[in-house]
Image (cartoon, rainbow, N blue to C red):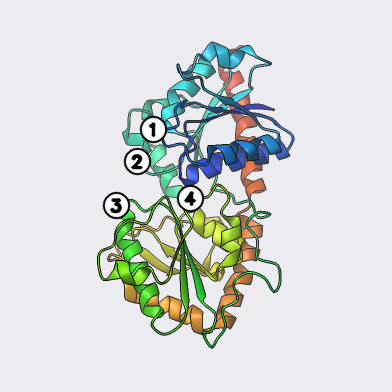
Amino acid sequence: MRILLLLARFFPAGQTTHVVDLARALARLGHDVTLLNTIPTNYLQVNRAEHLQDLETAGVRVILAPAAGIDPDSVLRDGPHPEVVHAHSTLDFALAASLSARIGVPYVLTAHGLGISGIVAGQYLAGAATVIAVGRRVAEEVSTMTPRVVVIENGVDTERFRPPEPGRGASSDMAGTNPLAILYAGRLGPQRLTPFRALASAACLLAQRRAVRLTVLAMSVPPLGEPLDGTLKAVLDFRGWLADPSPVFREVDVVVGSGRVIREGLASGKPCLLLGSAYRGLVSPASLNPALGHDFSGTAPSRPPPDGKCILDDLDRLAEDLGLRQRLAENGRDYALAHLGLERMALLTVGVYANSRRTFTAARLGPSG
């Protein structure tokens, strides 16, 4: 199938990883995939060169929009037309609808978060052949705009995100002579500042009793206020925002974050602490149920703001109980292989494309077709 994916920017967010991984996985399945980077400026483009190399290696054709903006005719001029257009950013919804009307193929949209139905782009949800929601709560919201909604959760490349080879990676011991290596990954905007401060406080308190390293994958580490800023310097390992963070996941003992980060942590065979705007504690693979879906959003309106003591208690448990860490690591990896894989996501998406093409053609032919 010839597939055109639209990506506004290589923005530092899970949405970018989702689109790049989907393109790679679709190409790996044998489809003809083109990715159109629709925003021409360098503003908010992060790790674009690395992503482009990754896509090229996978056999994905990439078109960079010209500085003057996109001329739909130029997009369609070379080679056969796509058989489906798929957009992920609200910035691209109008273009997806325009290309669909121009060449007579369906367009599919993916809703990556809550709040999408309340913005101007919501009108394009109603016109899409199918809207893919990355979770059940998102699907419930989108269903107020269109009945053509399916849930396909984020998938993780379990070949990239994998446990370290035996004898390599982090190896904290019961006596505390090796650092407990903690990884926080995610954006650190205003809504995440209080939760991250709680994590940093917990890491610094734990460091008074044992060696600790807090590795952070983010665009920057904002000031947290004294005396925490001064104390944090002794344990902080800031790596920036990486196109492929999987090697860092293999280096650590514990993964902290929300959303895609938890999926990547489970796939990497690491115990995970679910920390978003709320703290939801240790992720137990045994308590997960694929039939109910997976909510790793890190939001819980009924919970109080994240508390450093709760995080510290869980870090203490993981630091002291190596057996618990090993069980969570093995169970998390097994669960990710069974339920959270990238290929599964890509196959389900191809099914959406095929069904969208059938219903789109039937609608164009009408009852007498």
How far, Cα to Cα, is label 2 from label 3?
A: 18 Å
From the viewer's side, name the closer residue of 184 and 130.
184
Q: Earlier in the sequence, mark 3 or mark 4?
A: 3
Residue at x-position 64% and y-position 38%: 53
Residue matched to label 2:
115
How far, Cα to Cα, is label 3 from label 4?
A: 17 Å
- The secondary structure type at the circle numbered 1 is loop
Residue 299 x/y as whole percent: 36, 57
Residue matched to label 1:
145
Give the answer, above or below, for where 331 lies relative to 257. Answer: below
Q: Are marks 4 and 2 in contact (CB under 8 Å)?
A: no
Name the residue type under label 1. Met
Q: Are marks 3 and 4 in contact (CB under 8 Å)?
A: no
Q: Residues within 10 Å of mark 1 (few under 14, many from 20)?
A: some
How far, Cα to Cα, is label 1 from label 2?
A: 12 Å
Residue matched to label 3:
190
